[in-house]
Image (tube, grey):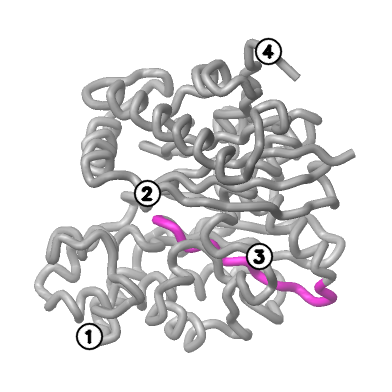
């Protein structure tokens, strides 16, 4: 039986709240519904950047030093407002929704230390909205020795199966961090974080120009790739690790491009993201027939050209398959919330390195219940 679920995602690019509606049984039946995006104000993003800095020394998942208390309250408030507005847009009532999948905002992800921290108050969200909420999706996996990321592969695999692909495909999600999912018919997905996504490029543009991103890859398109620096960036020990593997938004530094012009630095960092994805795909058991790109990086024309140049297969955006570029992760958390209600696995040995397939997420019941 299918139920109606909402998924919420605030990614490492810190651009806002994505909201998505799906109908699903948490297994093979998926019907994609409406999606909306609610951008953060610049003050919100500035607060999140302070929270990231304050989280750098965290040793306790529940601790909220410095600006983290304020940031957690802001994240919760923005998600409440986003859901309320989304329900208005979709002409729905809270009683129409079975569950919300709430990822929260990652401020620290160090699975090697057994620590992953997403801020946002799931129980408060449930009580305020009157809808059951599944939250804290990553902690159980990390506690069992998994990487806690990527989580979306279970949804990528379901979409690929529903699309009827007869040969392997890879789904590439490019947010602040990039990750890939290798989907072969009849097999459990294989996945890993690939390396930097938009984070280094976004940080470069913010510091150099005050702009939040390199929109459409315009700066990178005007620059030249410094091949020597690119090789230096690719010498990071992360790339020698086997899949599955994951990393933090701040695992890589843009320091090597500090002396380049803005355009050349953007071109080099864009090539770095594409080359890192190519290296991750090379770890997969077969060459895929198609690479499907979603996330903010799919809107970057220069990055898409770099991927087409470096990957061993055809490259297409998610929209060409009727999937969402921007709301894929939000849809995934709606899907995973339903799986959590049914105690179905969301992580696997081949996606996060956890020892056995594992259900995840904490369920916060609304006062009214369902």
Marks 2 and 1 sit apart, C-alpha to C-alpha, by 29 Å
Badge nearest the viewer, 4 or 3: 4
- Crowd class of label 3 (few under 14; some 14 to 19; many from 20; radius 10 Å): some
- Circle nearer the N terminus (2, 3): 2
Residue 185, image x and y in percent?
83, 66
The answer to the question of whether label 1 and label 3 lie on touching residues, with beta carbons closer than 8 A, is no
The residue lying at 79 percent from left, 35 percent from top is 344
Where residue 79 sits: x, y (%)?
46, 34
Q: Residue at x 49, y 70 (%)?
A: 277
Name the residue carrying label 2.
39
Mark 2 or mark 1: which comes first in sequence?
Answer: 2
Residue matched to label 1: 223
The disc, 4 or 3, on the residue closer to the chain's N-terminal end is: 3
Q: Return the residue at label 4.
A: 368
Q: Disc 4 and disc 3: Cα gap in Å?
A: 33 Å
Query: Do the CB atoms of the residues marked 2 and 3 lie less than 8 Å apart?
Result: no
Res. 123 image quadrant: top right
Residue beneath the point at 63% across and 11% down = 367
Judge whether 262 appears above or below 338 on screen.
below
User: Is residue 168 highlighted in magenta?
Assistant: yes
How far across and how far down the image is residue 156, in percent?
68, 58
> In terms of secondary structure, where does tag 1 sit?
loop
Asked whether 140 or 321 is in front, the reply is: 321
Span of residues in magenta? 165-176
The answer to if 301 sits in the magenta stretch is no
Question: In the drawing, what numbered circle is on residue 313?
Answer: none
Q: Which sits earlier in the primary sequence, circle 1 or circle 3?
A: 1
């Amino acid at each position: 039986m299918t139920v109606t679920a909402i998924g919420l995602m605030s990614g490492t690019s810190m651009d806002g709240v994505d909201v998505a509606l799906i109908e699903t049984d948490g297994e093979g039946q998926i019907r994609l519904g409406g999606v909306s995006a609610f951008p953060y104000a610049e003050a919100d993003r500035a607060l999140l950047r302070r929270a990231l800095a304050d989280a750098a020394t965290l040793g306790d998942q529940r601790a909220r030093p410095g600006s983290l208390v304020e940031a957690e309250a802001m994240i919760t408030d923005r998600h409440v407002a986003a859901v309320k507005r989304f329900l208005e847009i979709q002409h729905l009532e809270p009683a129409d929704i079975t569950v919300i999948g709430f990822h929260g905002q990652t401020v620290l992800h160090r699975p090697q230390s057994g620590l992953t921290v997403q801020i946002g108050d799931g129980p408060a969200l449930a009580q305020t909205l009157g809808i059951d909420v599944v939250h804290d999706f990553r902690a159980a996996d990390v506690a069992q020795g998994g990487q806690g990321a990527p989580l979306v592969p279970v949804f990528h695999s379901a979409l690929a199966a529903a699309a009827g692909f007869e040969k392997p495909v890879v789904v590439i999600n490019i947010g602040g961090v990039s990750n890939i999912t290798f989907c072969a018919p009849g097999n459990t997905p294989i996945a890993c974080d690939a390396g930097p996504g938009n984070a280094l490029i976004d940080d470069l543009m913010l510091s150099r120009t005050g702009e939040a991103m390199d929109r459409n890859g315009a700066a990178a398109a005007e620059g030249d790739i410094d091949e020597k620096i690119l090789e230096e960036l690719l010498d990071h020990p992360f790339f020698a690790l086997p899949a599955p593997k994951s990393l933090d938004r701040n695992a890589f530094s843009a320091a090597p491009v500090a002396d380049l012009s803005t355009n050349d630095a953007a071109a080099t960092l864009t090539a770095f993201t594409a080359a890192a994805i190519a290296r991750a795909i090379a770890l997969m058991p077969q060459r895929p027939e198609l690479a499907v790109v979603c996330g903010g990086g799919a809107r970057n024309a220069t990055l898409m050209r770099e991927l087409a140049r470096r990957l061993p297969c055809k490259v297409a955006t998610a929209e060409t398959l009727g999937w969402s570029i921007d709301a894929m992760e939000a849809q995934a958390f709606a899907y995973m919330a339903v799986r959590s209600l049914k105690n179905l696995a969301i992580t696997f040995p081949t996606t996060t390195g956890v020892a056995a397939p594992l259900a995840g997420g904490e369920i916060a019941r609304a006062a009214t219940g369902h």
